[in-house]
Image: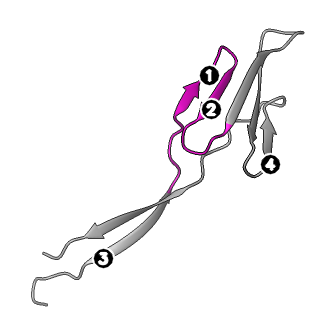
């Protein structure tokens, strides 16, 4: 070997963190994927319900059964290993 390594390029899919833009007391919108979160108190107990919708593709989810916030779409990150 000559002591030089070849450059390696890795493409990694990474799920970004959400950036919420709070519209009012009960509504927030993700700045990256435009997911709308509607948060409201449960009338029968001390907990909150959240519904998530995205108008672009008709996506709908809720946490009535304890579900987590759906993730943003993954983004591709390029990692390069430089030649030595």
How far is disc 2 from disc 4 in space, using C-alphas?
A: 15 Å
Asked if the residue at tag 1 contacts the one at tag 2, i.e. Cβ–Cβ closer than 8 Å, the answer is yes
User: Are the two marked residues, 2 and 4, in contact with CB atoms closer than 8 angstroms?
Assistant: no
Q: Name the residue under label 2.
A: 29
- Residue at 51 percent across and 40 percent down: it is 17
**Magenta stretch, overall SS:** loop
> In the rendered structure, which segment of residues is drawn in magenta?
14-35
Foreground label between 4 and 3: 4
Q: In which quarter of the image is residue 47?
A: top right
Residue sitting at 79 percent across and 9 percent down? 46
Query: How far apart are labels 4 and 3 at the CA level?
Result: 39 Å
Q: Nearer the viewer, residue 25 or 44?
A: 25
Does the segment drawn in magenta span residue 26?
yes
Residue 37 locus on image (x, y percent): 70, 30
**Helix, strand or loop for disc 4:** loop
Q: In which quarter of the image is the C terminus?
A: bottom left
Q: Which of 63 and 26 is in front in this view?
A: 26
Q: Which mark is residue 23?
A: 1
Task: Give the number of the disc on residue 8.
Answer: 3
Label pair 4/3, CB-CB below 8 angstroms: no
> Which residue appears at 54% of the width and 43% of the height?
32
SS under mark 3? strand
Residue 73 shown in magenta: no
Q: Badge 1, how many Cα within 10 Å: few under 14, some, many 20+?
A: few
Q: Distance between the residues labelled 1 and 3?
A: 44 Å
Quadrant of the image containing the N terminus = bottom left
Give the mark, 2 or 4, whose residue is nearer the N terminus.
2
Mark 4 sits on what residue? Answer: 58
First in sequence: mark 1 vs mark 4:
1
């Amino acid at each position: 070997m000559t002591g030089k390594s070849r450059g390696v390029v890795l493409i990694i899919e990474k799920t970004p963190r959400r950036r919420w833009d709070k519209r009012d007391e009960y509504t927030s919108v993700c700045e990256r994927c435009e997911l709308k979160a509607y948060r409201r108190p449960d009338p029968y107990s001390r907990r909150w319900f959240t519904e998530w919708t995205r108008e672009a593709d008709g996506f709908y989810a809720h946490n009535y059964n304890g579900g987590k916030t759906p993730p943003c779409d993954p983004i591709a990150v390029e990692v390069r290993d430089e030649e030595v």
